[in-house]
Amino acid sequence: MAKNAVDDYVCSTSWDSDLTRPVPSKWVPPPLGIHKVNVDNASSEQDNFSSVGVTIRDNNGQVVGALCLPLQSYYSTKLTEVFALEQGVLLARELQLPRVIFESDSLAVIQAINDKAMGSTFGHLILGIFQVCDSFESCHFKHLSRNYNTVAHELA
């Protein structure tokens, strides 16, 4: 057992960093007092449609809100994913949820949000999302694997 900061450092540097962390096998609930908002999109250029799905669950995994919204035309996957995130933020505000985690399986969109990419193609939507987020006590955006976003995907 390490007895001081130097021992702690030596001990931590000896850990095998190549060990893979266990990957969750299912959707992971948020901590107590926080709601998790999962969003996803569906788009078909061939069928000329796009839609978004949103599900909001509490720390017990109970659904407290959901949304399925067909859009009036086809939009790119990335733009539709931003629409989905926007709808999730708006629904969480409507439900007056104070602390939320927003999750999407679109890494590019989550990175754009977290980088505050206002100069991007959909920067005006990101700005709107941040304006709504000011109404929350806490608000975080996270990427998750498509495998753990099935409920929002099915809604979309």
Image: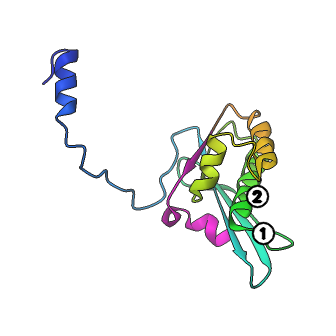
Answer whether residue 33 is magenta in the image.
Answer: no
Q: Name the image quarter holding residue 26.
A: bottom left
Of 17 and 23, the residue lying toward us = 17
Q: Amino acid at mark 1?
A: Tyr
x and y percentages locating residue 92 in the rendered image: 73, 47
User: Contact, CB < 8 Å: mark 1 with mark 2?
Assistant: yes
Q: Residue 152: within the magenta? A: yes
Q: Work out whether residue 36 can be spotted.
A: no
Determine which of the numbered discs, if any, sits on residue 83 in the image: 2
- Give the total of numbered labels: 2
Q: Amino acid at mark 2?
A: Phe
Q: Is residue 81 above or below residue 139?
A: below
Q: Residue 38, relative to residue 153: is it above or below?
A: above
Q: Which residue is mark 1?
A: 75
Residue at mark 1 to residue at mark 2: CA–CA distance: 10 Å
Tell me if I can see residue 89 in this picture. yes
Q: Which residues are magenta?
A: 140-155
